[in-house]
Image (spheres, helix red, strand yellow):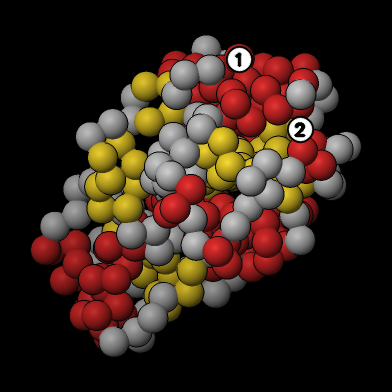
Amino acid sequence: MNNLDVWREIGTLVCDLDGVVYLGDEGIAGSGPALEALAEADIDLLYVTNNSTKTPDEVAAKIARTTGYAADPGSVVTSGIVTASRLSGLARTALVVGGRAIDVALESVGIEVTDVWQEAEAVVVGLDFGVNYDKLAGATQALRNGALFYATNTDSTYPTPDGLLPGGGVMAGALAIASDIEPVVSGKPEPEMQSYIAQRAHSPILVVGDRPETDAALAIDAGWSSAVVLSGVTRSLEEIPARFAPDVVVNTLADLVGLRST
């Protein structure tokens, strides 16, 4: 499943991170040189992740630390940033079940983060490594009190060197069950993320990721080219649903870049 036509005159490569560039705290083999080769070919790099636990500066630092490639923080788009942009003007205060990076994104658009559920006009949920019952209880009370419900993503898992672990969708799902309210979602493959990328990227666009139902689905819905790597969530061709079939399937980002010379 390798359509080499996807490389023709690509303007922007929209690159997922977890499972594509790095896995946990280790870079995936060849990802650093691959990013360097893309940059040298004058292909714009846009790092787009559903992981909302890090700020763009922290993401860029992790790319550099794990791969040796000096990524531009200005080229990083997280689901937390898109969620904050979407919520701007709709709420003045928000209770967050998620990492500090969500707080930073919300504060950057003038939304105050609060731990007091009675004060929350919105609840924003993402992957939270410190989630506990009290956090979920407060968020549930805020939602049942009328707060808006926004989720950065609904990914059920995220890839690590030890296998798949619970993702942000687990926290969002727990609150949806407890509140009887479904969240507004902004991460891949939602239209809001698609629009955000379209405003930042230069066409033609190639999306590469490890999760067909988010990365390939995003590209298919937008009419962009897509590639799935088998270095993260997806480990074999058989795991890719036919409705999310990408243009290219390769083992790693380095292998994808290697196709340009064939």
Where residue 86 is drawn, which disc sits there? none
User: Residue at 57% across / 29% down in the picture?
Assistant: 253
Residue where numbered disc 2 is placed: 44
Q: Is residue 27 in view from this perspective?
A: yes
Q: Position of residue 53 (x, y in %)?
A: 38, 44
Residue where numbered disc 1 is placed: 33
Residue 141 is left or right of residue 193, and the answer is: left
Residue ranking furthest to the right: 9
- Helix, strand or loop at label 1? It is helix
> Relative to residue 205, is residue 122 depicted above or below?
below
User: Residue at 24% across / 80% down in the picture?
Assistant: 177
Q: Position of residue 190 (x, y in %)?
A: 58, 66
Query: Which residue is nearer to you in this view: 21 or 149?
Result: 21
- Helix, strand or loop at label 2? It is strand
User: Residue at 81% across / 42% down in the picture?
Assistant: 5
Residue 237 is left or right of residue 46, and the answer is: left
Instruction: Give the quarter of the image for residue 151.
Output: bottom left
Residue 42 is left or right of residue 2, and the answer is: right
Question: How far, Cα to Cα, is label 2 from label 1?
Answer: 15 Å
- Between discs 2 and 1, the one toward the N terminus: 1
Query: Which residue is nearer to you in this view: 82 or 104?
Result: 82
